[in-house]
Image (cartoon, coloured by chain):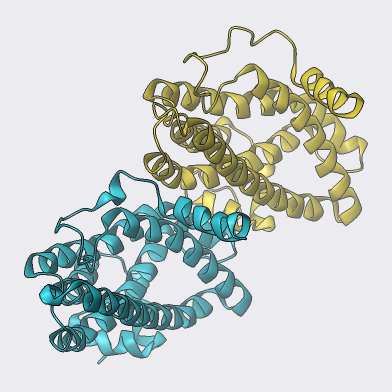
Chain colours: A yellow, B cyan
Amino acid sequence: MNTGAPQPSLRQIPVLLRGESDTIESWLSQRGLPQIFLFVAVIIVGSASYGAGMGLWRDPVQAGYTAMKFPLLILLTTFGNALLNGMLAPLLGLNINLRQAFMAILMSFTIAAAILGAFSPLAIFLVWNTPPVADQATSFSSHSLILLTHVAAIAFAGIAANLRLLRLLHQLSGSREVGWKILLAWLAGNLFLGSQLSWIFRPFIGSPGLPLEFLRQDAFRGNFYETVFRALKQLLLT
Amino acid sequence: MTTTWFNVRQLPALLRGDTITVRPWSNRASFAQTMVFLAVIVVGTGAFGAAVGFWRAPLQSVYTAIKLPLVIVFTTLGNALLNGMLAPLLGLNIGFRQSLLLILMSFVIASAILGSFSPIVLFLIWNLPPVSSGANTVTGFYGFMQLVLAGIIAFAGVMANWRLFPLLHEQAGSRTVAKRVLLSWLVGNLFLGSQVCWMLRPFVGKPDMPLEFLGPGLQQGNFFETIFDNLRDLLVKSP
């Protein structure tokens, strides 16, 4: 693989998946928009196809909605936290600039999106083999099955992407401790923003008992953390 | 005889797992070569399927001869994207087409083994009481048939993966990576393949069920739900 200045191409995706740190490190220092566009395109295609598979059980319209919302969720999290993550890297001892931090995170989301995209035929097949939403006797258990399966697939993609990112951070920092610190800091920031964005963008699968809609009518009422806090309070105090 | 092209005469090299001969076939992807692989799969599994269905009725034999190759083709193509992603993710430096060809080759081995078992299966069926001989006898032999077929298919599957492993090992240069990739491919293919089989039932054809191309599997439940329900009944509901 030429590590000089390769033209952005889909051939870079297997390199990302394998986590070849030397080659990936050289991409971080590359300037220009084409590289960013390629990664954004992979994120859109991969997560949109997975999102379509996710929403298909509820309705084809829900599939269209989720195919739009899932890439938006990833891109808004990446761009929304870019400044914070760019600041956290040098603060925690890694000598990279804002653009390099942004590219590293974008690459890890590209890996996650490529994995999710590869799972999308299975997600569609799962929906095809699950009782339809109209079957009221089983619709809630089917919803739970679909939900759990997606949680597992997304967790797998997320873990794989972060393991690859960790390897890159180790290489860049030359220290395991610094690599872990930055990864955890980035993860915390992305989880904080990402979970609230997911809350706003609900529904993704589409509950059988609720109407079909792009965003819930109460999308901006309450928030993810408040709901978790209330649930915990109810669990512990009653 | 070693060429960069796979032709049917070189099937023994594939069965032997001769990595030097086989390696160029996975590196050089062409439409014609893929068609030869598919042809071996269709002929091998088609012959085995025909033998399997023959006990129930000649028409079931035709149905199974069509459905068994479909199971393999659907599983290979349905998981192509996933398997192509898993190889580099787990450390194997091969492209999407190479991973697809490697999996196709392992199915070619399995199909060749199954195809060569088809005369034995036909002989077995010839020696079994026919379906028309009465419910009590037939039910017992139906179970026996299922076990024999499961044994043959398991043997073909194990051998195909046994031969795939050295190829993966050679490409990866590491036993650990090769094992990881093989296991992940197996899990994906088992997941999809078992459900595809469930949908395309019946293959043998139950004696007390009507003769049909597709049974109730396409509309009712799924393979994993049935396993889950059976396990739940066994663990929770049993006294």
Horizontal side of residue B60 vs A238, given as left or right = left
Q: Residue at x 39, y 65 (%)?
A: B98
Q: Residue at x 47, y 54 (%)?
A: B224
As rendered, which of B231 and B236 lies closer to the eye?
B236
As rendered, which of A147 and B22 lies closer to the eye?
A147
As rendered, which of A148 and B82 lies closer to the eye?
A148
As rendered, which of B159 and B120 lies closer to the eye?
B120
Q: Is residue B75 above or below residue B9?
A: above
Residue A197 appears in the rendering: yes
Q: Quadrant of the N terminus of chain A?
A: bottom right
Where, by quadrant of the figure, is residue B172 drawn? bottom right
Horizontal side of residue B165 vs B56, given as left or right = right
Q: Position of residue A109 (x, y in %)?
A: 63, 39
Residue A30 appears in the rendering: no
Q: Position of residue B116 (x, y in %)?
A: 22, 86
Where, by quadrant of the figure, is residue B237 drawn? bottom right
Q: Is residue A59 above or below residue A175?
A: above
Where, by quadrant of the figure, is residue A95 drawn? top right
Q: Residue at x 54, y 41 (%)?
A: A145
Q: Is residue A144 above or below residue A21?
A: above
Q: Is residue B155 above or below residue B195?
A: below
Q: Quadrant of the C terminus of chain A?
A: top right
